[in-house]
């Protein structure tokens, strides 16, 4: 071999070595990026789990799913690899009559050879070939990221719904309070008409009727509205105590019932 050929061969080997180093560096960088992306997704999913726990406690559901064993569909660990000594997966080595083998025991030997692809070894024993699907970690991480984005979107929607009360959720707090106190006052007005009719037939005297109209029924309407706002007008997730507008409710209830009685008297006189 001449010196020129030796030098060309040395340059070619150096080029191959540098290309291998570049490929190794690129693969190492790719693995670092994949590990960083996986760590980020893990932290993100952990934060989502904590937030879902808070939402569950806010709506009264404080039950975490039982932990599945590693390798199951709900487990957190990687699937357990089959060992040669396991009874559930022994391949053709366990098909020779060893007890506890459940790999292909449900099919006869002839049907098993027709149903499963086999790889013939040097000893002539047919062994089912395991077809492992190629998994691209980049694609899997991208799918996981999209699912995490979808979970964030649904979590935000759940938080918005949790910040709305069950009673008149689209109304403002002031409008909700006015509607509740007015409804309770109207219900007290119906009771007031009942007392008026009872007074007309002598079952209730005038002093009792006046006491209920001026104080009793308005107070019942006010406390009923206060309790309704506290029970159904409070969102599942709220910071602090929602306003119940006590002066406004007091004014509505203590004015609506007497005004209803006055309106009844005017209507009664007009119809006479």
Image (cartoon, rainbow, N blue to C red):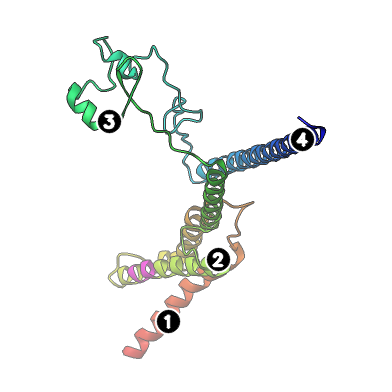
Q: Position of residue 264 (x, y in %)?
A: 39, 80
Q: Which residues are magenta?
A: 190-194
Q: Secondary structure at mark 4?
A: helix
Q: Which circle marks residue 5 in the picture?
A: 4
Query: How many tags in the picture?
Result: 4
First along the sequence among labels 3 and 2: 3
CA distance separating discs 4 and 2 = 102 Å
Decide which of 228, 89 is in the foreground and name it: 89
Q: Is label 1 in a helix, a strand or a loop?
A: helix
- The image shows residue 139 at horizontal and vertical percentages of 54, 46
Task: Calculate the distance from the C-alpha at mark 3 to the C-alpha at mark 1.
Answer: 89 Å
Rounded to the nearest whole Å, what is the CA distance between mark 2 and mark 1? Answer: 20 Å
Q: Is residue 226 above or below residue 202?
A: above
The quadrant in which the N terminus is found is top right
Between the residue at mark 4 and the residue at mark 3, the CA separation in whole angstroms equals: 54 Å
Of the residues under marks 4 and 2, which one precedes in the sequence? 4
Residue 110 is covered by the magenta coloring: no
Prevailing secondary structure of the magenta residues: helix
Q: Which residue is mark 2?
A: 249
Residue at 61%, 39% in the rendered image:
38
Q: Residue at x 49, y 61 (%)?
A: 225
Q: Are marks 4 and 1 in contact (CB under 8 Å)?
A: no
């Amino acid at each position: 071999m001449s010196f020129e050929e030796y030098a060309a061969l040395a340059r070619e080997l150096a080029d191959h070595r540098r290309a291998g180093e570049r490929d190794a560096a690129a693969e190492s960088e790719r693995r670092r990026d994949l590990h960083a992306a996986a760590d980020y997704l893990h932290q993100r999913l952990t934060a989502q789990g904590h937030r879902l726990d808070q939402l569950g406690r806010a709506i009264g559901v404080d039950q975490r799913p039982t932990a599945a064993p590693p390798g199951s569909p709900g487990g957190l660990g990687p699937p357990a690899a089959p060992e040669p000594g396991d009874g559930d997966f022994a391949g053709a080595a366990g098909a020779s009559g060893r007890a506890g083998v459940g790999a292909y025991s449900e099919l006869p030997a002839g049907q098993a050879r027709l149903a499963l692809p086999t790889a013939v070894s040097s000893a002539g024993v047919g062994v089912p070939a395991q077809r492992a699907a190629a998994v691209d970690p980049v694609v899997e991480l991208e799918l996981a990221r999209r699912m995490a984005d979808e979970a964030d979107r649904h979590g935000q929607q759940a938080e918005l719904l949790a910040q709305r009360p069950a009673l008149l959720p689209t109304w403002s707090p002031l409008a909700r309070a006015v509607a509740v106190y007015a409804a309770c006052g109207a219900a007290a007005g119906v009771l007031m008409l009942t007392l008026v009719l009872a007074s007309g037939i002598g079952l209730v005297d005038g002093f009792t009727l006046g006491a209920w109209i001026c104080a009793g029924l308005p107070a019942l309407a006010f406390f009923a509205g206060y309790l309704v706002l506290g029970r159904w007008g409070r969102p599942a997730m709220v910071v602090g105590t929602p306003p119940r507008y006590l002066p406004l409710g007091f004014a509505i209830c203590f004015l609506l019932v007497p005004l209803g009685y006055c309106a009844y008297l005017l209507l009664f006189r007009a119809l006479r």
